[in-house]
Amino acid sequence: MPLPPAATTTAEMPTSILGKTGVRVSQVGLGGAHIGKQSDEKESIRIIRAAIDRGVTFMDNAWDYNDGKSEERMGNALRDGYRQKAFLMTKLDGRTKVAAADQLEQSLRRLETDVIDLVQVHEVSMKSSG
């Protein structure tokens, strides 16, 4: 079922300050794990932009979601001014300086940005992929 146009919604998205950063983000985030699974990339972009248009600002992702496809699709969706409306985060699982730096460079390229607002270490209980 299609969503109503963002302009017709009247509720405001609840927000909170993220920790001690002073940055206000939406209390609801959009997880990137599912974003690379749609057969049509246009559907992924529609999902991301619809969320942002409705006040979701916290965009979650990870270097290894769907072999990088999730970050690529989020990067494509954040074109046309959408990047400025989003708090962009991703996760890395490299356990060495070299591996983490390589993954970070890949994420920056896929997400089509020169700044990632939050980077977290992912899957600390799992074996490293780098």
Image (cartoon, rainbow, N blue to C red):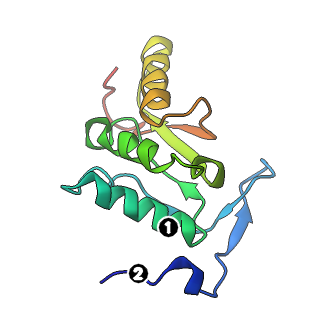
Q: Is residue 34 left or right of residue 88?
A: left
Quadrant including the N terminus:
bottom left
- Pointer 1 or 2: first along the chain: 2
Where is 33 relative to 113, above or below?
Answer: below
Q: Nearer the viewer, residue 88 or 53?
A: 53
Circle 1 or circle 2, nearest the eye: 2
Quadrant hosting residue 15: bottom right
Quadrant including the C terminus:
top left
Disc 1 crowd rating (10 Å Cα; few below 14, some 14-19, many 20+) is some
Amino acid type, callout 1? Ala
Q: Position of residue 50 (x, y in %)?
A: 47, 68
Disc 2 crowd rating (10 Å Cα; few below 14, some 14-19, many 20+) is few
Q: Residue at x 45, y 84 (%)?
A: 4
Amino acid type, callout 2? Leu
Quadrant hosting residue 110: top left
Q: Position of residue 56 (x, y in %)?
A: 57, 66
Q: Nearer the viewer, residue 92 or 51?
A: 51
Q: Residue at x 44, y 39 (%)?
A: 122
Q: Nearer the viewer, residue 107 or 53?
A: 53
Quadrant hosting residue 45: bottom left
Where is 11 relative to 108, above or below?
Answer: below
Residue occupying the far top of the picture = 98
To which residue does mark 1 refer? 51
Q: Which mark is residue 83?
A: none
For label 2, the SS is: loop
Q: Position of residue 93 (x, y in %)?
A: 41, 31
To which residue does mark 2 refer? 3
For label 1, the SS is: helix
Q: Is residue 82 left or right of residue 14?
A: left
